[in-house]
Image (tube, rainbow, N blue to C red):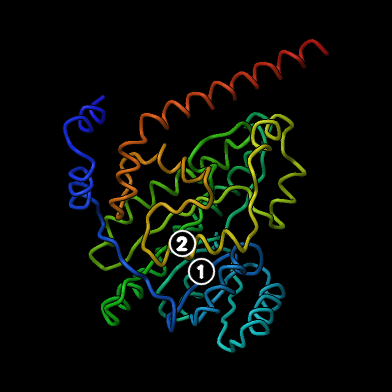
Amino acid sequence: MAAALLLLLVPPVGLLAALAFLARPRGARVPLKGRHVFITGGSSGIGLAMATAAAREGARVSILARNLARLEEARAAIQRDWGRSDVGVHAADVRDAEAVARALEEAGPVDVLVCNHGVFVPQELERQDMEEIKWMVDINLMGTFHLIKAALPAMKARTRETRLPGSIAIMSSQAGQVGIYGYTAYSASKFALRGLGEALQHEVITDNIHVSLIFPPDTETPGLEEEHKRRPELTNIIAGSSGGMKANDVAKKALDGIKSGRFIVPCNFEGAMLAVATAGLSPQSSPVMAFLEVIGAGLMRFAALCFQWNWFSTIEGYYAKNKKRE
């Protein structure tokens, strides 16, 4: 209601001018050429695609994952495609804070940190083992804490030394914007990353470090193939209609967002709508995006209620149908 009254009182040009003043943090360009980009989950999927794209732009790339053999294969692929001889590989489990700290010390100061690691096993909470839930939270959330905590001191020193903005990019998911049946544990671990990112941006902005939260949809990776083997039938009905993306396309969207210092980085049209619908109190450096969020908030809330009506109707119908079969 307040937003509608504001629009009636303030012409669009005036509103844009006001938002240009209010938008924070200020926009920044984060260059990749000649800088050190450290990517977790870099041996396959989105991580490897991002590492390859960053190397193509002239970055010195380091990749981290658990399997050394797969890391070496990824390094060979990047070197073969782009002739880079300075691709660093680091085998570590992100759940191990000491191993992560050692890997970052070996890699050297980082300019752009991409926390791309993640695991996902879909299952209703009642049926999912607590050890499996803890495994997801430990990797998706605590692993991100371990990386950022270990990288921050040297990153701050680098931005002071180079006077160039740094970046901490966190790979969330559209399931980190909206909860879906069967994603209880996974969504919890990904929603938490948003709180981490929002508070962290406050803490590091005076060090010229910009935080980016990336929200990809289903992406064609080896991990997605494993997920589909365990997805509950109802999850497939609700979420299966959403279009997936290729890893290279997500990597491009992610790097574009990182380079422009954007906080929220959607990867497709559906993600852009979700970004407007869930903007809340998140940082926003673009006056144009702030304008779309202000004028679109009411409409997106109505659309969200329509989606929720459809999802709850689907769930009720599914269980009613199955009860008749019993």
- Is 250 in front, or is 202? 250
Helix, strand or loop at label 1? It is: helix
Q: Position of residue 324 (x, y in %)?
A: 79, 10
- The percent position of residue 44, horizontal first and vertical second, equals 66, 66
Q: Residues within 10 Å of mark 1 (few under 14, many from 20)?
A: many
Q: Which residue is mark 2?
A: 146
Name the side, left or right, on which 270 lies relative to 197: right
First in residue order: circle 2 vs circle 1:
1
Q: Which of the image's four quarters has the C terminus?
A: top right
Q: Residue at x 17, y 52 (%)?
A: 21
Residue drawn at the location 24% of the way across and 51% of the way down: 23
Amino acid under disc 1: Val
Q: If the image is split into quadrants, where does the N terminus sit? A: top left
Q: Is residue 315 above or below residue 49?
A: above
- Whether residue 271 is situated above or below residue 82 in the rendered picture: above
Q: Mark 1 highlights which residue?
A: 100
Asked whether the beta carbons under mark 2 and mark 1 sit within 8 Å of each other, the answer is yes
